[in-house]
Image: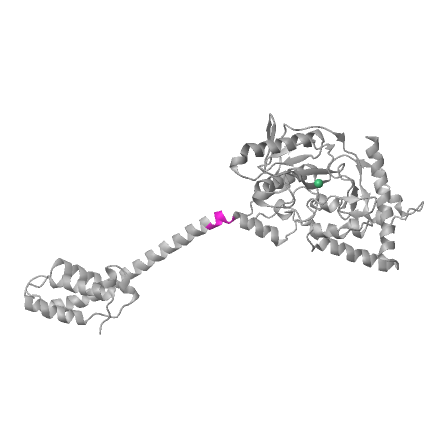
Amino acid sequence: MQDFHPQNLRYARVVERYSTYIQSPVLRLRFLKNALKNDQPNSLWKRIPFLGTLPDRAMIIVELAKVLPIDQPAPLGIRLTSLLYRIRYALYAVCVALALFAGASLVYAVSKIASSLSVSTEAKDLATSGQPVAAGSNGSEAVAAIGSGAGLTLDRVWLADEGEGFEFYSNGARVLTEFETSGAKRSFYKFDLESLSSWSGAAGSSAGNSSASETFSNPVGIVYHVSESDLLPFADRYNSSLQDHSRALLEYARAHRLYNYLIDRFGRTYRIVRDEFEANHAGNSVWSDGRSVYVNLSASFIGICFEGRGAAMGAEGINEAQIYAARVLTAVLRSKYGIDDANCVTHGLVSVNPSNHLMGYHTDWVSEFPFEALGLSNKYETELAAISRLGFGYDQAYVSAAGGKWPGLEEADARLKEAAEKDGSSVEEKRRQLARGFQHAYSKQRAIEKEQ
Ligand SMILES: [Zn+2]
């Protein structure tokens, strides 16, 4: 029994159509009976319109030939079908080629669309790949692999244009200058880490090296902050209020000389305190790049602030426009001053309380800072020298603020313990000894701040 199937129905229709070539009703009936017996099993080929029915049609023509008069030329439709049947494999090949081409074109088009949509995903991949940017301040390293070879090395970053209220850089950075102000001239010491951490306080000790007498005035690093200001919902119906909020923050920052740069929620970069002056951004703070130690970083580091609250990301916090702005601004500053990646750090990683020797007086960006997205190595994985070499401790609140796991902190703890064991002292004794080195540096730096 033949299944009722669209394919069979189609075959029957074809047979019927060919039967119209036969004039005699008797012959037509015989043709129909024979031809309908011959339906072949369904195959993939049969699904191709017209071409798929060629084998069927050929068979029908064989049946047809039996009943058509032999002294007349076969009708045109039949001759054409016979021809097509004979070259059917070539036709199938053309069909396959066309289908493959169409498929490939579709795959190409889809992949083009997909890749244009997946830019932010790639940025995320970059951020989690933990690929550190090689340290060094030769000023020509790439800011980061951007995935497509599109990254610019720092020597390709220059001031391309400037005008009333703006500066424009070759890497797309745009700095708005309408809120610019001045401040106290930068003046700071570079202390030697080795000398400070072996400082004993005794006259004539090895610390002679650490009491650097030379002061510097070009910025050597960057500290990133969050404004922790009230945020409106990021939606177009709040557009003018969003602008008012940013403007109020900018005016406040200028009045108090809070930062060198502020990046508003639309990703606009404003210069507040000009680079050659110190802004009041870092307070009591310390950072070491592994060679030098800097104390109270407002004098030595540039302060960049994101308008935001906590480390929240997206519409509720720091958004991609701000991260992009910070990325290109960072490249501009690193290029201009030869700032080492190792000295690009966050407030939460440098802020200290000198009176109780604890880390984390301020905790903005104590975690979650998108270092990799800014083309920087992840400083949460860098040993915190303040703990391992300069005698600072921390409390549980600091670790909680960082959200728990923190490789740089763990490494610092391990190093401190090792050093104490080597000296045959307790960790607490070792801390007190190291703290004297910091205290020495702190007093020296404070002395030049008071001269200002
Ligand atoms: Zn801060």
Quadrant holding the N terminus: bottom left
Judge from the rendering whether residue 332 lies leftward or rightward of residue 452; answer left or right: left
Q: Residue furthest bottom?
A: 1
Residue 448 placement (x, y as % from top left): 83, 34
As rendered, which of 442 and 174 lies closer to the eye?
442
Residue 326 placement (x, y as % from top left): 62, 40
Q: Can residue 127 be seen from the camera position used here?
A: yes
Judge from the rendering whether residue 415 lies leftward or rightward of residue 17; answer left or right: right
| Residue at (18, 61) in percent of width and height | 81
Residue 172 placement (x, y as % from top left): 57, 37
Residue 138 placement (x, y as % from top left): 69, 43
Judge whether 119 appears above or below 39 on screen. above
Quadrant holding the C terminus: top right
Q: Quadrant of residue 230?
A: top right
Q: How many labels sit on residues? A: 0
Q: Ligand 1 quadrant?
A: top right
| Residue at (52, 47) in percent of width and height | 119
Q: Can residue 142 be seen from the camera position used here?
A: no
Magenta run includes residue 108: no
As rendered, which of 87 and 357 lies closer to the eye?
357
Judge from the rendering whether residue 318 lies leftward or rightward of residue 340; answer left or right: left
Highlighted range, magenta: 114-118
| Residue at (87, 47) in percent of width and height | 436
Judge from the rendering whether residue 279 lies leftward or rightward of residue 422; answer left or right: left
Determine the main secondary structure of the stretch shown in magenta: helix
Q: Residue furthest top?
A: 164
